[in-house]
Image (tube, rainbow, N blue to C red):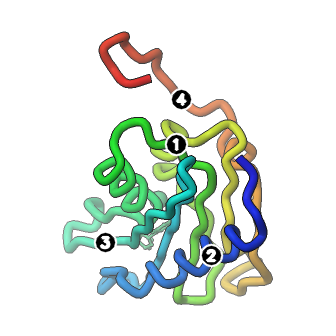
Amino acid sequence: MSLTSEEAQRLQQAATQAAENAYAPYSNFRVGAAILLDDRSIVTGCNVENASFGLTICAERSAMVRAVSEKGPHVRVAAIAIDNLNGAPSSPCGACRQVLSEFAQEDAMVFFPTGSGNAVSGMENRPFFDLFPFSFALAKSPSEPS
Ligand SMILES: O=c1ccn([C@H]2C[C@H](O)[C@@H](CO)O2)c(=O)[nH]1
Ligand SMILES: [Zn+2]
């Protein structure tokens, strides 16, 4: 599903806004993600840290689980935008790529701030499966939603 430039802009703004809600007292790295679903609605998420650091959930997975919780198991991701309030490059981590791959459309796009070192040089957009080729998947059983 292709996005209009207006949709892409709205998605990026939603990601930036979602980062305002981040709970990141340990890293102070505040991340927001906005997912454009196949019904063209937008669902957002932010990172939620924990004193038991490994329990932290990233913004991207937070948005993904919210999308399923609100819309059900058939949701499909047309695009995801990520931003942070730290002016840093950030593309989805490996764990988030694996979780998103379960719901991503074949032509899903990722919008993310890039740069070198800690400096952002711009927003990039790439096909999701260029970032995550050969993703792990299992055949779904007939009783599960396809
Ligand atoms: O793609 C990423 C990478 C990191 N984080 C969060 C997790 C943690 O709270 C903070 C620093 O790693 O940023 C995300 O939300 N998304
Ligand atoms: Zn992640």
Indicate the position of residue 94 as horizontal and vertical percent values: 53, 50
At x 69% / y 53%, what residue is drawn?
A: 109
Which residue is at a point 54% across and 40% down the rendered structure image? 101
**Badges 3 and 2: C-beta atoms under 8 Å apart?**
no
Spatial separation of the CA atoms under disc 2 and disc 1: 18 Å
Among numbered discs 1 and 3, the one appearing first in the sequence: 3
Residue linked to disc 4: 136
Mark 3 or mark 2: whose residue is earlier in sequence: 2
Query: Which numbered disc flags the more N-terminal residue, 2 or 1?
Result: 2
- Name the residue tied to disc 1: 76
Report the mark closest to the observer, 4 or 2: 2
Q: Which residue is mark 2?
A: 10
Q: Secondary structure at mark 1?
A: loop
Numbered mark located on residue 48 in the image: 3
Instruction: Name the amino acid type tagged 2.
Output: Arg
Q: Nearer the viewer, residue 84 or 25?
A: 84
Q: Amino acid at mark 3?
A: Val
x and y percent of residue 4 in the render? Answer: 76, 64
Task: Return the disc, 4 or 3, that comes first in the chain's sequence.
Answer: 3
**Separation of disc 4 and disc 2 at Cα?**
31 Å
Q: For the view shown, which residue lies furthest in the left direction?
A: 51
Q: CA distance from mark 4 to mark 1?
A: 17 Å
How far apart are the two marked residues, 4 and 3, measured between alpha carbons?
A: 25 Å
